[in-house]
Image (cartoon, rainbow, N blue to C red):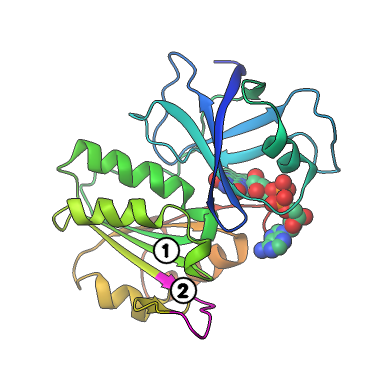
Amino acid sequence: MPQVRVPLRRRERIADQTMAFFFEKPKGWPFIPGQTIDVTLIDPPESDFEGDTRTFSIASAPHEPEIMVATRMRGSAFKRVLATMAIGSPVLMDEPIGSFVLNTDAGRPAVLLAGGIGVTPFRSIVLDAASRGGGPPIWLFYANHRVRDAAFLEEFGAAADGARGAFELVPTMTHLDADSSWRGETGRIDLGMIRRHVPRGASPIYYIAGPSPMVASLHDTLVAAGIPKPDVRVEEFAGYA
Ligand SMILES: Cc1cc2nc3c(=O)[nH]c(=O)nc-3n(C[C@H](O)[C@H](O)[C@H](O)COP(=O)(O)OP(=O)(O)OC[C@H]3O[C@@H](n4cnc5c(N)ncnc54)[C@H](O)[C@@H]3O)c2cc1C
């Protein structure tokens, strides 16, 4: 399917410097949770050297009524335009692509490892699995600096509460304020943290998404620990330092 024109329906602040954008869902436009789209601005009032197109993971699940993407707002012309354009204005969307999707055939558990806004494909994957039910167990390790940076945290918590063990959420904070009342995991996701939550012998497939340095370092850690390379899938959010 070629590019489609879709209007922006609404936008919402979902965490510190983080917004979700909801677009009309094109008709006959299937996607698999974990896939990405290119969004292109049409005649934007400003532009910068990165141009008018960005790649985003689809954060909404296929059963939801809109296409949602979520992003950190750090001041590029593209994002300024997205944050201020009139509701109802169209953007161009390329058809969903990508192979960063759950390997459901194997029936093996999934360990999802997210750095910050790298959690977007996992929202789609987790909500889709919850709506279908009966799939293999999923663990989501979700690292953020502080609680206020963690998009979708409550939604994931609710999914875990309703999943009766089929989905476990392990949020971790890496830069807590001194007066924080956080009682969960702290520090970066590492092997020790994964082993505290995922039973030995579970034989999961690992999926890592986030900024490139985080993805590369976790990938190398897992492979060095003896996880076969084909069992470690990655999605690098190129464009984030
Ligand atoms: C397969 C794929 C999937 C992607 N999915 C998503 C997604 O779902 N959501 C998403 O937000 N992005 C996603 N990205 C990245 C996205 O395409 C943009 O590159 C990214 O959001 C940066 O956007 P921007 O260039 O508009 O810069 P902005 O985010 O506006 O940043 C402005 C400037 O700040 C710099 N900057 C980068 N990191 C930091 C930092 N940690 N702190 C402060 N400043 C920083 C940037 O280099 C940039 O120059 C994906 C990329 C790929 C390849």
Residue at position x 20%, y 65% from top?
202
Q: Main secondary structure of the magenta part?
A: loop
* Residue 233 covered by magenta stretch: no
Residue 89 appears left or right of 33:
right
Please identify the quarter of the rendering in which residue 181 is found: bottom left
Spatial CA distance of label 2 from label 1 is 8 Å
Query: In which quadrant of the rendered image does the N terminus lie?
Result: top right
Please identify the quarter of the rendering in which residue 113 is found: bottom left
Residue at position x 45%, y 19% from top?
29
Please state the extent of the stretch shown in magenta in the rendering.
172-180
Label whose residue precedes the other's in the sequence (2 or 1)? 1
Please identify the quarter of the rendering in which residue 130 is found: top left
What is the secondary structure assignment of the residue under circle 2?
strand
Residue at position x 47%, y 37% from top?
35
Can residue 105 be seen?
no
* Residue on which disc 2 sits: 173
* Residue on which disc 1 sits: 142
Residue 206 appears left or right of 162:
right
Q: Nearer the viewer, residue 18 or 218?
A: 18
What is the secondary structure assignment of the residue under circle 1?
strand
Classify mark 2 as within 8 Å of ligand 1 or not, answering yes or no. no
**Disc on res. 113:** none
The residue type indicated by label 1 comes to: Tyr
Q: Position of residue 63 (x, y in %)?
A: 33, 29
Tell me, yes or no, whether the two marked residues, 2 and 1, touch with CB atoms within 8 Å: no
